[in-house]
Structure formats: C-alpha cells, structure tokens
Amino acid sequence: QVQLVESGGGLVQPGGSLRLSCAASGFSFRNFWMYWWRQAPGKGLEWVSTIDISGSTYYADSVKGRFTISRDNGKNTLSLQMNSLKSDDTAVYYCAQDKFGTVRGQGTQVTVSS
C-alpha cells in the first residue's frame, strides 16, 4: 500500500534553513504529481508546494522564493528545501500523493523560534 515517510524536521532559528525529505513506496512514484502540505497549531491544512511528473514546480505565495521542492525518481524521494524560515512557517509538514492532502504521511514537525 502507499507509504509516505517524512523526515528532516526540527527546531531552527528565524532565518535558518531545513531540508525535509519524504520516502515514498507502494506506488509508481515517477507517475504521480507530489505535494507538500503543512498544518500550523490550531489551523487547517495549508498547501505549500507541488511538483508534477515533468519536474515543473508550484508554490504558495507565502513560501515562494524561499522554499524549493524537488524529486528524485530513482530514489522515490520528495524533498523540500526551506530557507529564510519565519515563525509563521512553524507547522507539521506532510508530503502527499494527492492534491487534497488526504493521502499523506505522518508528518514532520518544523518549529521556527529563537
């Protein structure tokens, strides 16, 4: 079955960087658009970024210019490079196989705080 396992979260100071990874299995990764979503404390799920099967990328306005999504089809891995982090980026980050964020992993916590 579909399995998505996120890693790479942690505590970082404002202005810092983190790189999240998502190991995918149980489906033909190269044939799926992939997504990053996040959920801040007390808020709903928020779309962050998308990468399609050709490698074209899309970003929410709130992260554009700071975050970079990428994929390695040979390793079935999705990544999110996050730079210039802000306190508003604090959230649990999920990788997802569908555009609604319903097929997703367990998430990885990112906390941006001094």
Image: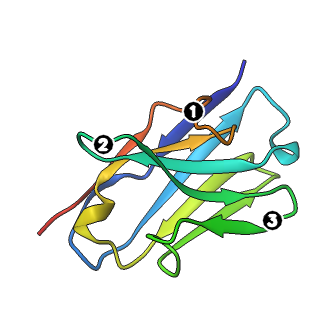
Q: Is residue 71 left or right of residue 84?
A: right
Q: Position of residue 1 (x, y in %)?
A: 72, 17
- Residue under numbered circle 2: 43
Foreground tag (1 vs 2): 2
On the rendered image, what quadrant is the C terminus found in?
bottom left
Q: Earlier in the sequence, mark 3 or mark 1?
A: 3
Q: Earlier in the sequence, mark 3 or mark 2?
A: 2
Task: Decide: few, some or many residues near mark 1? Use Cα within 10 Å; few <14, some 14-19, many ≥20.
Answer: many
- Residue under numbered circle 1: 104
Closer-to-camera residue (93/23) = 93
Q: Amino acid at mark 1?
A: Arg
- Element on which disc 2 rests: loop
Q: Amino acid at mark 3?
A: Gly
- Residue under numbered circle 3: 55
* Dots 3, 1 in contact, CB < 8 A: no
The number of discs equals 3
Q: Position of residue 105 (x, y in %)?
A: 53, 32
Residue at x-position 85% and y-position 47%: 30
* Marks 1 and 2, how far apart at CA: 17 Å
Q: Position of residue 16 (x, y in %)?
A: 30, 76
Task: Decide: few, some or many residues near mark 2? Use Cα within 10 Å; few <14, some 14-19, many ≥20.
Answer: few
How are the residues colored? rainbow
* Marks 3 and 1, how far apart at CA: 20 Å
- Element on which disc 1 rests: loop
- Element on which disc 3 rests: loop
Residue at x-position 68% and y-position 38%: 24
* Marks 3 and 2, how far apart at CA: 30 Å
Residue at x-position 85% and y-position 55%: 53
Q: Amino acid at mark 2?
A: Lys
